[in-house]
Amino acid sequence: MSVTVAPLSQAHADEVLAIYRAGIDEGQATFETTAPTWEVFDAGRLPQHRFVALGEDGEVLGWVAASAVSDRCAYAGVVEHSVYVHPAARGRGVASALLTALIGSTEAAGIWTIQSGVFPENGASLALHRRAGFRIIGTRERIGRHHGVWRDVVLLERRSPRIS
């Protein structure tokens, strides 16, 4: 499968939000129960650190986006990210291509840590992140309810070897 990674823009909004909704509906990706509007999505993610993976005919196969974790200057080099892939495009290297683009953009910007939280049941995401150089730093047990059930979240981070 040929995949092109490009900046995520409003032109991709409908497909990006549909992929997000699919991840929400599967129940293993997020505590969210509904996808946001484009305006909310756009406002909450850093424009220079969000990408789409496009198939040969231009369809969006997946997306990755980062958000600032804090406005405190001590955390200026720390972002949190999400990565989602269309169910029909999984297992084809789409998420790896997206994480590679995100790592490149964050390192170029001087960001030293990318973090994320993943449900422990989401083995594919945990394996993807390990391959991309993320490490597990802990588990937040029973951190939130999801559809009435307490869920744990595995905390992951990737510290850039290039930023000192």
Image: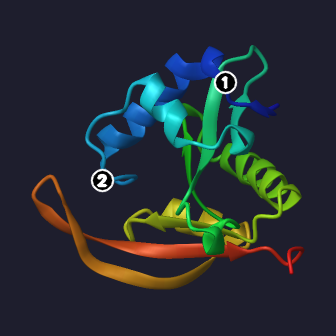
Name the residue at 51% across, 35% down: 43
SS under mark 1: loop
| Residue at which label 1 appears | 9
- Residue 81: x percent and y percent? 57, 55
Measure the alpha-carbon separation of dots 1 and 2. 24 Å
* Along the viewing direction, whichever of 53 and 91 lies nearer the viewer: 53
Callout 2 environment at 10 Å: few (<14), some (14 to 19), or many (20+)? Answer: some
Q: Which mark is residue 76?
A: none
| Residue at which label 2 appears | 31
Q: Which residue type carries mark 1?
A: Ser
Front: mark 1 or 2: 1
Name the residue at 46% across, 25% down: 39
Please determine whether, in this image, residue 93 is positioned above or below residue 75: above
Please determine whether, in this image, residue 138 is positioned above or below residue 134: below
Can the viewer see residue 92?
Answer: no
Name the residue at 54% across, 68% down: 126
* Along the viewing direction, whichever of 117 and 53 lies nearer the viewer: 117
Q: Quadrant of the C terminus?
A: bottom right
Callout 1 environment at 10 Å: few (<14), some (14 to 19), or many (20+)? Answer: few
Q: Quadrant of the N terminus?
A: top right
Circles 1 and 2 in contact, beta carbons < 8 Å: no
